[in-house]
Amino acid sequence: MQRSVSIVVPVYNERENIDELVARTVAVGQQLGRPWELVLVDDGSRDGSSERLLELARQHAGLVKALLLNRNYGQHNAILCGFSHAQGDMMITLDADLQNPPEEIPRLVAAIDAGADVVGTVRLHRQDSVFRRLSSLLVNNVVRLTTGVMMSDYGCMLRAYRRRVVEAMLACRERSTFIPVLANMFAKRTAEIEVRHAERTRGESKYSLFKLVNLQFDLLTCMTTTPLRLLSYAGGAIAAAAVGFGALLLVLRIFFGAAWAGEGVFTLFALLFFFVGAQFVAMGLLGEYVGRIHADVRERPRYIVDSVGGETMGETNSGLPSSTRATGSREFR
Ligand code: UDP
Ligand code: MG
């Protein structure tokens, strides 16, 4: 069976790029030789992109769909909106600024066909500023260490996801998220391929330094609550050091007398540090609760049933669960 393909593109003030984007993507889509669609999500553009997208959707009726959001909600929310309106068996995301060449799409499709749940990409000869490349290097390493998923480039949004992974992501209730990291939580087999990367030739990056920093916080909180736990560890270490310091002071005081220890000033320090440490431990404890509340409100699916073998107690099972397609399907728990 040939899997259908949805290509989802978030668009924010990309008027100069969308004509070429749609032309090139449609050309690639036609060569896929299977059902496909292009879903363009306008993330509250103010430069006329919205009208142009509607126009393009009319021109390519049956292949291109435009969804206009009423204001700017951010790239990842725009993509999620696209996902929830896309119908393909696999979904491919890419940027509208043509930094990700649409011509790479067939290779991502092939990787999903070969059995991957999620396909990540590595940008060959990345065409971005040194600052962007260095910060990506840092972030990618931190993500790799904390998640243990060995993907090299989380920043590149040219990616492919199998439908069931997308549905699991849509079933999550969290408001701030980082799609590539979230997807890995629901993927058994991940693949990674190298893709070309182009310079942004028209328009400018939509990420100011402030937005970039915010995005990194989304990434961090989407992935782990470990920083909250670190508070307890740091507090424990500080308190333990303070106790050691106190004991040392006591011993030295016995041998050298009170004058040596500044008449008790250092003892005060030891006490102070002990309480500072205890406060950190208390905050860490609060953090444990907050972390659990955070996990609960997100309502991430606990698991996804891939397939079922056998029938018991008179039920009629056709091998695969009745449908993992409908969102909110009972296969997510
Ligand atoms: N984008 C979006 N909403 C935003 C910011 C960006 O939909 O609030 C889109 C943007 O139109 C582009 C993609 O996300 O298609 C990546 O943005 P950009 O190229 O500016 O990011 P960079 O390549 O600098 O990381
Ligand atoms: Mg870009």
Image (cartoon, rainbow, N blue to C red):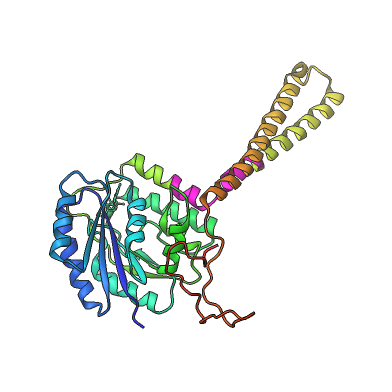
224 drawn magenta: yes
For the N terminus, the quadrant is bottom left
Q: Is residue 151 left or right of residue 254?
A: left
Q: Position of residue 104 (x, y in %)?
A: 27, 70
Vertical relation: 264 (above or below) 52: above
Residue located farthest toward the right when viewing the structure as drawn? 254
Q: Position of residue 294 (x, y in %)?
A: 55, 46
Foreground of the two, 102 or 230:
102
Q: Can residue 137 be spotted in the picture?
A: yes
The residue range painted magenta reads 217-232
Q: Can residue 230 be spotted in the picture?
A: no
Q: Position of residue 80 (x, y in %)?
A: 37, 56
For the C terminus, the quadrant is bottom right
User: Which quadrant would residue 71 be assigned to in this image?
Assistant: top left
Which residue is found at the position 77% from the left and 16% from the top?
263
Q: Position of residue 329 (x, y in %)?
A: 48, 65
Q: Is residue 261 left or right of residue 51?
A: right
Which residue is found at the position 22% from the left and 59% from the top?
98
Vertical relation: 108 (above or below) 263: below
276 drawn magenta: no
Vertical relation: 8 (above or below) 298: below
Which residue is found at the position 53% from the left and 53% from the top?
299
Foreground of the two, 286 or 66:
66
Residue located farthest toward the front when viewing the structure as drawn? 314
Magenta span: predominant SS is helix
Count all numbered tags in the image, as a single digit: 0
